[in-house]
């Protein structure tokens, strides 16, 4: 069968020295896994990856898939042809019909001859192809320094032709930095935190604490939707839904009123640690920033950190809300995050939460709540959902 070809440029991976192979292998695996429905296959030639897919691969889906795969800095639909100038010219015509430049502006031909046995020099290839472009787009001018459009032609084992490449998300391939559990709420922040952490190579699964009926089924649907939206960036993700109504009611009943939020957060950390250890994750990621709400002071966060021996990563710590919102819009989670189904019912939120708890004292208070049994029960009743790397929910763990 004919196949569709994409050229992929990898970024920071190339800086990784001795580990380079590992990073590259992971990137290839992540891309192939995402696009396996079209029998993705990858070949490497001189620092470039060539992705081959079945001819019926859907361009829009592939575009979305590649622009959400960390480790990719750029990609373009590429076309292959025989190593013969007539074949190149007719292929270029075909490519420019499929991806036309606009009528006005400037262009450049970027020709590279890796195979020196090819009879024409890069310069000669450029000249004849510039004639083709002029003929098709008579009003375009040539600009070698700052062209609006570039047509790339690479003469290697075969000839590859492509137009301007799309930007990839950069970063490092997921799962090159280990595994983490994200505390995913229905808010704006935690999905952004997930993407930030995944960008550095973490493989992330999500935990959501659900307090039905205080938080509604719609709130759960919203969190599932968020998980499906971030799944492409995470290379697929599991969502663990922990039923935490009884735990929250116990905290509400037994703790000092102004400490309920703090105690709730402590129990979330303790639960997340248990799940993380069971699932072999070695860090917890949250969407907390500094000083955004009462529970996000240094004292409050250092208290909740003391509930776990795992590393707690807060990728948003230095971002303000504007920046977080901007990123949420870019990754496409914002509109879902602002839907009005609260993730934490007001009955559980104190009017005057403590902002500067004393660690030792709060710890004692927390211990006196004896949460272990509730936590064990909640984990036992936990539901698991799986969203594949294209963001689709799968019934099995895939
Ligand atoms: P977000 O916009 O992400 O909800 P927020 O600004 O509303 O954050 P909080 O509600 O204090 O702040 O939550 C801080 C972080 O705690 C969240 O980003 C998330 O990581 C975690 N979190 C809060 N509620 C839940 C929940 N019900 N389930 C899982 N994690 C939660
Ligand atoms: Mg919240």
Image (tube, rainbow, N blue to C red):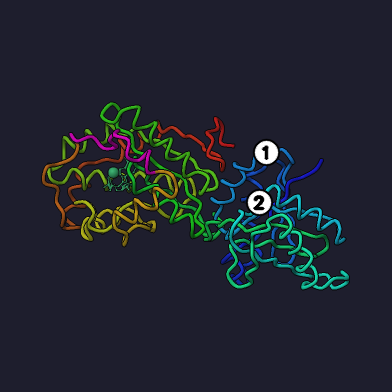
Q: Is residue 335 visible?
A: yes
The residue indicated by pointer 2 is 100
Q: Which residues are magenta?
A: 334-347
- Which x, y percent locates residue 36? 67, 42
From the top left corner, tell me how far across and down residue 164 is, in percent: 63, 58
The CB of the residue at mark 2 lies under 8 Å from ligand 1: no
Q: Is residue 24 above or below residue 236?
A: below
Instruction: Find residue 279 and name its label.
Output: none
Q: Position of residue 343 (x, y in %)?
A: 29, 37
For ligand 1, give the image quadrant.
Answer: top left
Question: Where is 154 relative to 392, above or below?
Answer: below
Give whichever of 130, 114 is nearer the camera: 130
Q: Which residue is mark 1?
A: 37
Q: Compare marks 1 and 2 and give the one earlier in the sequence.
A: 1
**Separation of disc 1 and disc 2 at Cα?**
29 Å
Quadrant the C terminus occupies: top right
State the image quarter where residue 149 is shown: bottom right
Q: Residue at x 55, y 47 (%)?
A: 235
Question: What's the residue at 64%, 61% (across, down)?
Answer: 140
What secondary structure is marked by label 1?
A: helix
At label 2, counting other C-alpha atoms closer than 10 Å, the crowd grade (few under 14, some 14-19, many 20 or more) is some
Q: Residue at x 20, y 44 (%)?
A: 261
Front one among 50 and 362: 50
56 horizontally vs 60: left or right: right
**Is residue 175 visible from the viewing direction of this image?**
no
Q: Nearer the viewer, residue 174 or 358?
A: 174
Using the image as rendered, state which of residue 149 and residue 238 is in the foreground. Answer: 149
């Amino acid at each position: 069968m004919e196949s569709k070809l994409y050229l992929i440029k990898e970024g920071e991976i190339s800086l990784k020295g001795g580990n380079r192979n590992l990073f590259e292998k992971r990137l290839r695996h992540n891309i192939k896994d995402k696009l396996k429905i079209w029998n993705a296959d990858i070949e490497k030639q001189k620092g470039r990856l060539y992705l081959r897919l079945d001819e019926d691969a859907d361009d829009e889906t592939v575009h979305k898939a590649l622009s959400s795969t960390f480790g990719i800095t750029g990609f373009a639909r590429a076309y292959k042809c025989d190593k013969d100038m007539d074949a190149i010219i007719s292929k270029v015509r075909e490519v420019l019909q499929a991806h036309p430049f606009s009528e006005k502006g400037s262009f450049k031909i970027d020709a590279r001859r890796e195979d020196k046995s090819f009879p024409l020099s890069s310069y000669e290839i450029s000249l004849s192809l510039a004639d083709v472009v002029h003929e098709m787009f008579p009003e375009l001018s040539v600009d070698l320094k700052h062209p609006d459009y570039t047509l790339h032609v690479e003469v290697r084992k075969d000839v590859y032709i492509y137009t301007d490449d799309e930007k990839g998300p950069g970063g490092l391939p997921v799962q090159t930095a280990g595994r983490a559990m994200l505390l995913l709420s229905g808010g704006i922040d935690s999905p952004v935190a997930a993407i930030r952490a995944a960008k550095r190579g973490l493989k992330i699964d999500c935990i959501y604490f659900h307090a039905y009926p205080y938080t509604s089924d719609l709130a759960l649907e919203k969190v599932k939707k968020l998980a499906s939206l971030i799944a492409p960036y995470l290379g697929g993700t599991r969502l663990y839904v922990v039923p935490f109504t009884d735990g929250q009611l116990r905290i509400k009943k037994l703790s000092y009123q102004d400490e309920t939020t703090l105690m709730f957060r402590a129990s979330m950390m303790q639960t997340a640690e248990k799940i993380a250890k069971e699932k072999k994750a070695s860090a917890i990621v949250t969407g907390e920033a500094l000083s955004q709400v009462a529970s996000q002071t240094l004292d409050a966060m250092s208290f909740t950190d003391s509930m776990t021996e795992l590393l707690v990563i807060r990728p948003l710590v230095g971002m303000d809300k504007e920046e977080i919102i901007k990123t949420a819009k870019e990754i496409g989670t914002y509109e879902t995050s602002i839907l009005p189904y609260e993730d934490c019912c007001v009955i559980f939120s104190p009017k005057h939460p403590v902002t500067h708890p004393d660690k030792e004292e709060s710890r004692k208070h927390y211990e006196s709540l004896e949460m272990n049994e509730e936590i064990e029960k909640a984990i036992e009743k936990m539901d698991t959902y799986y969203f594949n790397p294209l963001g689709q929910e799968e019934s099995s763990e895939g």
